Image (cartoon, rainbow, N blue to C red):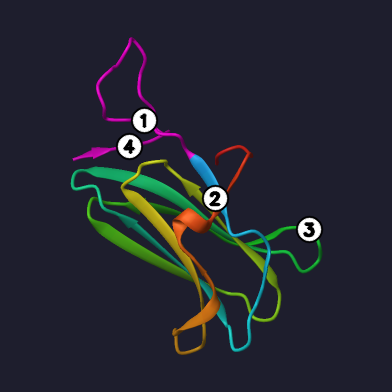
Amino acid sequence: MRHIQSGECRKPKCCGQDHKFKRMVLTTGVLNTVADQTAAHIEVANFDPTETFEVRVQVINWNSGAPVVLLNQLVTLLPNRHVNLSQNVTAFHYEVRIFHPGSPNVIANTFAIDAGTFTLPGLTFNQKELMELDIPFM
């Protein structure tokens, strides 16, 4: 088992150039909490059978108009493993930001949940629905 860092790719060289995963910074954009929501819930899975990846997950409070980071968690995803994180976001504007390694085998989804950890309709974002930001990768 090998640990992948800095967007490194395990593919062999092609045309004299190293393949690299395109690391991405993904965002939900600024969201407003929904009725009965108590937390933002993020699930990240690594479906690769041999490679380990790192993903940083942030939850940001935007109520003041400027970003205040509430959660800034670096997660090591072992092969065929899943991690979930939750952050209280009661009654404010928030954003979920994911610093993604770029591997097609790493999938991140976000949900709004209530106090019983049930998913609430309206603020579920599958990875393909997240927007890519053009900001530095952490």
Helix, strand or loop at disc 1? Answer: loop
Which residue corresponds to mark 3? 66
Mark closer to the chain start, 4 or 3: 4
Give residue 131's position: percent from left, percent from top: 58, 51
Does the CB distance between marks 4 and 1 fall below 8 Å? yes
Helix, strand or loop at disc 4? Answer: loop
The mark lying in front, picked from 2 and 4, is 2
Which residue corresponds to mark 4? 4
Side of 9 where 134 appears, left or right = right
Residue 26: mark in rendering:
2
Which range is magenta?
A: 1-23
Q: Nearer the viewer, residue 132 or 3?
A: 132
Mark closer to the chain start, 2 or 4: 4
Does the CB distance between marks 2 and 1 fall below 8 Å? no
Q: Which amino acid does label 4 sit on?
A: Ile
> Neighbour class for label 3 at 10 Å: few (<14), some, many (≥20)?
few
Side of 127 where 137 appears, left or right = right
Q: At 52% across and 86% down in the image, what residue appears?
A: 114
Q: Residue furthest top?
A: 16
